[in-house]
Image (tube, rainbow, N blue to C red):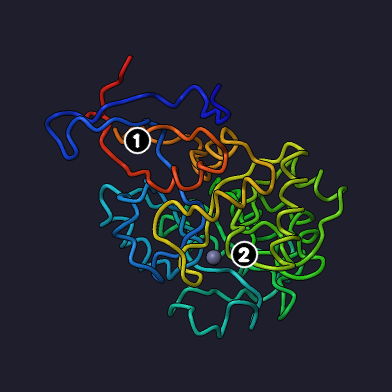
Amino acid sequence: MNRVDLGDEARSVRRSLAGEHAGETGTRLPPFIDHHVHLALVDPSGLGAHGIAGVVDLGANPATISRFAESAGRARVAYAGAFLTAPGGYPVGRSWLPEGAAREITPTTSSPADALPDAARIAVDEQAAFGASVIKVTLNSDGPVLDLDTLRAIVAAARIHDLPVAAHVEGEGMTRLALDAEIDALVHTPWTEHVPSSLIARAAARQVWISTLAIHEGAGRDTALDNLSRFREAGGRVVYGTDLGNGDLPVGVNAVEIAALQDAGFGARGILAALVDPWPAAAQPDDGIATFVPGPRPTAPTDLPAWLARSCVVPVEDLEEIR
Ligand SMILES: [Zn+2]
C-alpha cells in the first residue's frame, strides 16, 4: 500500500520516442506555479527545467516586469507591479529594491464626493495599466504603515479593475489591519506574530495565504508553521510560494518549502493543490504543458520533497499515458 496519495490527476506516463529522454517513464501532473517570486532578482531561465511552469511576481518596476512578461513567451508570468506602501514605508530604501519598484502613497484625504481621484486610485490604476493581475501592498510596522482608510481606498480601486489585493504583513497587529481592510491574500504566512484563532477564522473565510515557509528559521519558522497549520485546519486556501529572489533559494521546485508544508500538516494532495492553484487567475490556461516527474513514485512521505524537486515542465504531446 502506497502511503503517498497523489490524487486523481497523477498519471503514469512515458516520454515519447521522438523527443528528449525518449521512453523515460514517470508521472504526469498539472503545471506548477510559484506564487511569490521577484524575477528581477534572479535568473529565471532554469524555472521550467526544474518544474515551475508559472510564476507570480510580487514586487517589481511595473514597466520592467510587463516588458519581461511579454517577452517571456512560453513562461507564464502574472505580476503585481510596484509595492504600494506608506511614504518612507517598507521596502523603500532597501538595497535590493529595484529602481521604480516601490510606490509611496500619501494618505487618502478625499471624500467619496471628490471629483479628483486620490493617490491610492492613481497608483492602482497605474499598475493595472501595466497589466498587473494583483495589487501588492506592504504593511510592516518597523516603519510607516498605510492607514486603514488609505488601504480601503486601494482595495476599492483594485475592485474597479477586478483585481485582488495581496499584503506583506510584518509586525504586531498587521494581520488584523489587512483583514480589516478586506485584503484578499497574504504574500507570506505571518511569521512575526501569533495570529489568534478568531483572526485565523476570519482569514480562512476570505484570504489566500502564500506559504513562503522556507525563508525563515528559528522562532519565525515555528510561528509561521503554527499559524499556517491552524489556517489549513480552519479551511483556509494555501498556495505554494517561495519568495524566490529573497536570498539564496533554488530556481525551481524548492524541496525545503515542500518539507516545511509537510511540517505544517499538509499531505501530498494538499501540497499538490497548493502547487497547481491558479491564483490570482481563476483557472490555469489550457496551453499544452504539464509537469513530468521521472522515475518511480515516492512510497514514503519523506521521499515527496526530493521527488517533486526532480520535476520538469514538458509539452503534453511528449507524454503518452501508460495503462
Ligand atoms: Zn517577496
- Above or below: residue 235 compared with residue 145: above
Image spot of residue 222 (x, y percent): 74, 60
User: Residue 295 shows which numbered tag?
Assistant: 1
Q: Residue placed at 51% from the left, 32% from the top?
A: 299
Q: Residue furthest top?
A: 323
Image spot of residue 96 (x, y percent): 48, 80
Residue under numbered circle 2: 137
Q: Amino acid at mark 1?
A: Gly
The foreground one among 268 and 116 is 268
| 296 sits left or right of 101 in the view | left
Q: Residue placed at 56% from the left, 85% from the top?
A: 93
Q: Which class describes the residues within 10 Å of circle 2: few (<14), some (14-19), or many (20+)?
A: many
- Above or below: residue 136 compared with residue 73: below
- Above or below: residue 134 compared with residue 63: above
Q: Nearer the viewer, mark 1 or mark 2?
A: 1
The foreground one among 300 and 93 is 300
Q: Residue placed at 40% from the left, 54% from the top?
A: 252
The foreground one among 1 and 263 is 1
Residue 39 in view in this figure: yes
Q: Residue furthest left?
A: 18
